[in-house]
Amino acid sequence: MRMTDLIEKKRDGGALSREEIRWMIEGYTKGTVPDYQMSAMAMAIYFRGMDMDETYELTMAMLDSGDRIDLSAVSGIKADKHSTGGVGDKTSLVLCPMVAACGVKMAKLSGRGLGHTGGTIDKLESFPGFSTAIAGDAFLRQVDRVGFAIAGQTAQLCPADKKLYALRDVTATVASMPLIVSSILCKKLAAGADVIVLDVKCGSGAFMQTEEDAFGLAKALTEVGRRAGRRVVAVVTDMDEPLGNAVGNALEVKEALAALRGEYTGDLMELCLTLGTQILREGGAAADDGEARAMLEKAVESGAALEKFAEFVRAQGGDAAAVYDPALLPQAPVQMEVPAAAAGTVGRIHAEDVGLVSMRLGGGRAAKDDEIDLAVGVVLHKKVGDPVAAGESLGTIHARTEAAAAEAADMLRACFEIVPDAVTRPPFIKGVVR
Ligand code: URA
């Protein structure tokens, strides 16, 4: 086989066969297919797309490029959750303990933040001593005993995706449906869970900007997952404004702890209840959605979910004192309010730009190896649809210095669109695709 022939076939709108896809992915992983040819192929796929058979074959070829985690030593149903990425997304910190407190185990691999989006691993490192370098038997034992574990991704899982994702990032080929589907699912399939719940973000802060595209992605993910023999559910959710109110590592942990104490009832909790409901029902722990939701609510009300979170922090070497006393988490020395310039209603909050404010304060990475400041970030006091008086605070900046806070305050004010008329908030949960 020759890579030029495959590129030509895809460029002209043809469908690649199973053998062709496998040959290409194996060659790319080994290095016999060079980056320049793979870039051309990624661009051809970007413009021509792939049908469902090709997308499935690409997913399976990338899955077979590396190791798989065998969760069979863990008793019961194992679930996993993935989000297509967003600003202020601390869902895993709340969802995993809620679900584990209801008896379904979660084996989760997470990443670090890059650019305007945060990473679960960075957030968890707000607990002194906490480590996500947990693998092999220790990972399995913890999932079995505690009910969940969150570990860093290893290089041995889907190496083809690692290479291809980095290539897509620099060749303007990330936003391709079959490439996104295969990239997300190969990693989820390799991680071994029986039930996979996907949070597909839709809106200005997401890969999929329109509902049509987000539902298209959700359908493709569930279909390829089903063909691969897993129970996959996708929930399409709004990402036109940040999730919850906090953006920044330790600030997001504080918000997650408030949610686990039952003190947070906004979009973050709604998302955790919706995703958790799918997991409990698909995992057989609840007969229907109503029962599942009631179980999750009870796990929060009774304190069982918070207790589970503390058990998890301890199991991964962290100091769990901050779970009960969040004032012990990293705190920034400067706090500055951001007053609204005019009265009105919040019409929009540009999610990606809020992520950039946090990054500029030092809470995110511009490059992979940058050090981050866990304490800094933003806490929003207003969300879309809220009325605002002139001079009322839109949010609080948490910064290292007064100068950094003042610069961030101007940036945050520009993230808000204040309009004269009342605004109806669009539904946060757009739909569930099974
Ligand atoms: N997340 C992934 O892991 N891969 C993509 O292609 C997009 C989002």
Image (cartoon, helix red, strand yellow):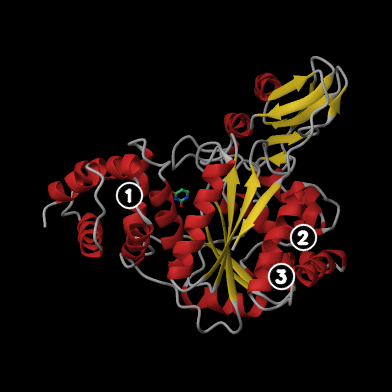
| C-alpha gap between disc 2 and disc 1 | 41 Å
Question: Mark 1 vs mark 3: which is more N-terminal?
Answer: 1
Query: x, y (%) of residue 415?
Result: 67, 25
Question: In the drawing, does residue 94 fall left or right of residue 290?
Answer: left
Q: Residue at x 74, y 73 (%)?
A: 288
Residue type for callout 2 = Ala
Looking at the image, residue 282 lies above or below residue 172: below
Per the image, the residue denoted by label 2 is 321
How far apart, in angstroms, are the residues tagged by discs 1 and 3? 37 Å
Q: Which residue is mark 3?
A: 311
Instruction: Give coordinates of residue 178: x percent, y percent.
Output: 39, 51
- Identify which residue is drawn at 41% across, 54% down: 183
Mark 1 residue type: Leu
Residue at the disc numbered 1: 164
Q: Which quadrant: the C terminus?
A: bottom right
Say above or below: 282 vs 39: below
